[in-house]
Amino acid sequence: MKKKTDTKAKKPWGGRFAEASSDVTERMSASIQYDARLYRQDIRGSIAHARMLKKTGILTAVELGAIEKGLREIEREIEEGRFEFSASLEDIHMNIEAVLTERIGDAGRKLHTARSRNDQIALDLRLYLRDEAAEIDKRIAMLVSVLAALAETHIDAVMPGYTHLQVAQPVRFSQHMLAHAWALLRDRTRLQSAVRASSVSPLGAGAMAGVNYPTDRAFTARELGLEGITPNSMDSVSDRDFALDFVYFAAVLGLHLSRFCEELVLWSSAEFGFIRLSDEVTTGSSIMPQKRNPDLAELVRGKTGRLYGNLVSLLTMLKGLPLTYNRDLQEDKERVFDSVDTVKLSLEGMIAMLPGMKLNTEAMKAALYRNFSTATDLADYLARRGVPFRKAHEIVGGLVRHCEESGADFFNLPLETLRGFSEHFGDGIREILNPETSPERKLSAGSTARGEIEKQIEAIKAILGGSAHD
Ligand code: ARG
């Protein structure tokens, strides 16, 4: 960003002040270093506002023409890095307005009629979140489709499912991938609700009481493609719930990604050995030549901390603020921007990491034969033969203890041994003990059986297809 070095410039908001701001006031007030990124939204909002002023007879067609042309020119210059920002002009709103006025004179001075920076910033941030949300939504959809593809490709890979990180029951690897996919689809819903909250126009609330002109707020909202206008001028300039909704969405998405990444880290360890991440997404050690570290997964996991920080920081900043606008509100932007950047980067990292991941199905299979993974199947077998489930649970518990104490192989227990524990053990028991076919014995909707997984994949494809992006 190009910057002017004009400290001690005259205050931009006119006649009230005889002296320039002190250096520290200027340094604390200036937000242009970060809110310059709102320039597109600020210009879009200003053009919609100017059109409304023309429609209501406040601006002439000539004035509107000069404003639109001037603003477009400024937009191009900012895009190309040719625009000079000035810290003494505080923020993006005043930087743009001052240069516009410098160039087109009084028409530029009229642009701020029936508007305040208070409703202007409340609009800009909403427009910004809507724009960014579209890109973030695309990336979530992409990640979900990567997961669905992995589930489809590896539909027959079976691995242990865990509770308490102890081997629990055999599951298909695809069930595990889809579990994460569904969580991400809920994140999408949360994002959409933040977008809805951002889709009403606060513009026209003025500083906080409304404006002394017969404006047409609904016209401005329509110009901007928004769904309507905020109903109360004071609430319009105080409300940052839409920003909270967004940073909350981001925190929960981070939470989901961090859980997934934790598993990728575990699974790529020598102890699990279930997956191998590609060279492109792993790094070596400067001292230990053998190392292949899953840094990308660790970084996505780590970045979740900032997403929580942004949520807590915004909640704390808003707490106890009296109505209406307070300058504290300027502190919302860096938190929102950081959540936007972090979420986009993390999603990009996940999309880069997953397709190149190799599965070690032999290691998964070996792990299935640990910790009596089909003990539940055995108890269900007895229950189906009329043994009350609690009783069956106790019998199989005894069997497990017997195996632990005697070192017997649970998965190959001879029928006589089994019958020593219950006379109901009989035909087909070998198959019931087999952890590799255990997923197929799951009959309930949403289970890890192949047919249920196929249904989930279809359902996810339909959801993604229904919201197909360009
Ligand atoms: N830069 C300010 C912000 O981000 C814009 C609104 C300034 N309003 C004011 N009354 N100083 O909140």
Image: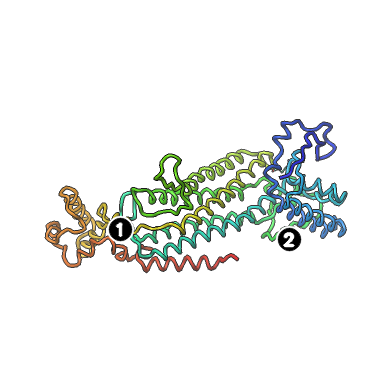
> x and y percent of residue 50 in the render?
80, 55
Name the residue at 54% across, 45% down: 307
Residue position marked by numbered label 1 in the rendering: 365
> x and y percent of residue 20 in the render?
80, 32
Q: Which of marks 2 and 1 is in front?
A: 1
Name the residue at 52% across, 44% down: 308
Residue neighbourhood size for the residue with mark 1, other residues' Cα within 10 Å, grouped as few (<14), some (14–19), many (≥20) = some
Residue position marked by numbered label 2 in the rendering: 223
> Which image quadrant for residue 306?
top right
Picture colour scheme: rainbow
Indicate which quadrant contains ligand 1: top right
Q: Distance between the residues labelled 2 and 1?
A: 59 Å
Q: Is residue 208 visible?
A: no
> x and y percent of residue 121 in the render?
70, 47
- Classify residue 146 as left or right of residue 399: right
Which quadrant of the rendered structure holds the N terminus? top right
Name the residue at 48% across, 54% down: 353
- Classify residue 385 as left or right of residue 61: left
- Classify residue 348 as left or right of residue 444: right
> x and y percent of residue 275 in the render?
39, 54
Q: Which amino acid does label 1 sit on?
A: Lys
